[in-house]
Amino acid sequence: MHSSLIMNFHLIITNKQKPISLLLIIQLIHSFSTLTNSQSTLCRTSCGTIPIQYPFSIDDGCGSPYYRYILSCSDSQKLELRTPSGRYPIHNVSYSDPHIVVTDPFMWNCEDGENYRPTRPFSLDTSTRFKLSPQNQYLFFNCSEENVIVKPKPMFCQQFPEHCDSSCDSASYLCRHLPVCSFAMSGSSCCSYVPKAIESLRLMLMYCSSYASVYWRNVGAPQPYDQVPEYGIRVDFDIPVTTRCLRCQDQSKSGGGTCGFDTQTQNFMCLCKEGNFTTHCNDYDNARHNRNVHVIAGTVTGISAFGALGIGGGIWYLKKVRAKAPVTCGVQTNENRLF
């Protein structure tokens, strides 16, 4: 469809026998205006089976600028988290209890057994609004006891680690009951440690062969069976709540817009079907941003450029033809869009 539209447009503007009509220019302008007015439809709401909601986005200009460029959706519809240590597949996202769960392909798993693969520590950008969840518990394998204090801890340390020393617990419940695994590890081959910071995780891996992260997932059952251990790294996040975003999303007052931002100034924008507003979708008194929109949201920049080029070329050719001969009745139409 893309190539045929471009070819048709090229044939029209190069046909010197049948000039372009004013109707063609009007249709081009209408197409371009329609494209620019539908910015909110370019904010994708899912990647695979994972919903994408505020404050996140996978299209620039959507969501909160605090999480810009953080998430990416691959061609195979796999959602990934970008961090300084690499890209990590996202297992799920919760907005009611704000957190994401990522999987680290370099982590130890049951299939590895005592064959420890080379690994690298997971890290987060401290400038973002992400933080490691206190519900994570880390297992370290085959640590050097010359550099790491490996010893059993009392049972209460598992519930109140802040009241215990910083040694790596060789009597950990998780080492004795590895999730999903049909075997257990004991002694110096496995110990549990709750690092106070990412740097602690890096230091531990300097003296241990591998690691695994286990988070305690809430299943809604009565205590003490309300949590089950699962492999993964839980990362908590903040949801920036603003009055403007709430008004933008309000179905009763504004028809339900999408919270976004100007990609150049990062100022708030409400992305609506009718256009982009600085307040909410029904605020027609304020100036719209349709003609000066900086929301990229996928491929809108490239599309708008082609639309502008088509309109400019059509107007230039129309002026040239009018200077030579009057417009005839041979009306030809073309829709110069790549979307």
Image: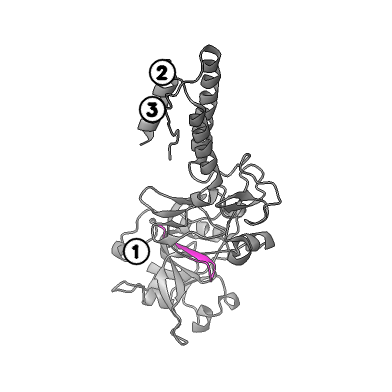
Q: Which residue is mark 2?
A: 15
Residue 69, compared with residue 17, is above or below; it is below
Q: How is the image coloured?
A: one colour
Q: Which residue is mark 3?
A: 8
Quadrant including the N terminus: top left
Q: Residue at x 33, y 74 (%)?
A: 184
Q: Position of residue 220 (x, y in %)?
A: 46, 81
Q: Nearer the viewer, residue 200 or 92?
A: 92
Outermost residue on the front side: it is 329
Q: Is residue 224 magenta?
A: no
- Left or right of residue 220: residue 240: right
Q: Residue at x 55, y 40 (%)?
A: 33
Going by the numbered disc 3, the residue's amino acid type is: Asn
Q: Which residue is mark 1?
A: 109
Q: Nearer the viewer, residue 275 or 200?
A: 275
Element type at marker 2? loop
Find out whether the residues at labels 2 and 1 contact each other: C-beta distance under 8 Å. Answer: no
